[in-house]
Amino acid sequence: MHKQDGFTMIELVMVIVILGILAAVAIPRFMDMRSDAEKSVVTSLVGSLRTARGLAYSKLVLCGGLYGGGGSPLHMGHFVRLDNNPPQEFTCTSGSITGHTMGFDGIRDSLLLNSSADILDSISGDIMTLNTKTGRTVTITHDSTAGNITWVATPSY
């Protein structure tokens, strides 16, 4: 009798079936990880926006500017830089401020579906709308009177 080397057809089919089952279980888990990571980026972004707003408000108070009663509210455009350049230092001019505390360059590649998109196009007043890589629309809202920054994703994470 000759000894034959190799695998039988049944052994090969069983390996393919096992790999198929593993792929069916693993792929949805990896897809979920991408959504979880993106949600973390959005949460971090909103936290950074809150910090930038707090810095801008503090600088406005230090500059002698009025906020709320008698002065104009602090809008998202006051503390978010919309281009690739680094944040500008705030300067005070007769109670008003110029400059920004937060830039968006690093966020474009990790979050946005179109990484070359102009963030300026996504801001309307105090509402920022971003289309993410997982196909969600994230709406970030700044309440300029209360100072709150909230977000919602459609569909939700």
Image (cartoon, rainbow, N blue to C red):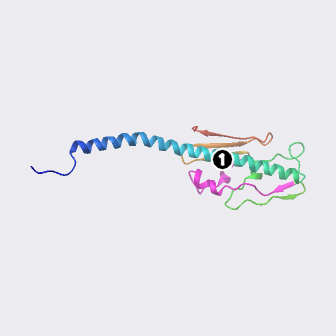
Q: What crowding class fits label 1: few (fewer than 14 Cα within 10 Å), some (14-19), or many (20 or more)?
A: few
> In the structure shown, which secondary structural element does the residue marked by tag 1 occupy?
helix
Q: Which residue is mark 1?
A: 44
Frontmost residue, 67 versus 32: 32
Query: Does 6 sit above or below residue 156?
Result: below
- Residue shown at the point (60%, 43%) measured from the top left: 39
The amino acid type found where label 1 is placed reads Ser
Query: Does 69 sit above or below residue 81?
Result: above
Q: Residue furthest bottom?
A: 85
Find residue 122 and report its horizontal and vertical position in percent.
66, 49
Q: Residue furthest left?
A: 1
Q: Is residue 51 left or right of residue 70?
A: left
Find residue 133 and report its horizontal and vertical position in percent.
55, 48
Frontmost residue, 36 versus 137: 36
| Image quadrant where residue 100 sits | bottom right
- Residue shown at the point (89%, 42%) measured from the top left: 69
First to last magenta residue range: 96-125
Q: Does the magenta portion include 12?
A: no
Find residue 101 and report its horizontal and vertical position in percent.
75, 55
Q: How many marks?
A: 1
- Residue shown at the point (21%, 44%) measured from the top left: 9
Q: Is residue 21 left or right of residue 81?
A: left
Find residue 57 and report its horizontal and vertical position in percent.
82, 49
| Image quadrant where residue 136 sits | top right
Q: Quadrant of the C terminus?
A: top right
Q: Is residue 21 left or right of residue 154?
A: left
Q: Does the magenta portion include 118?
A: yes
Query: Does 88 sit above or below residue 132?
Result: below
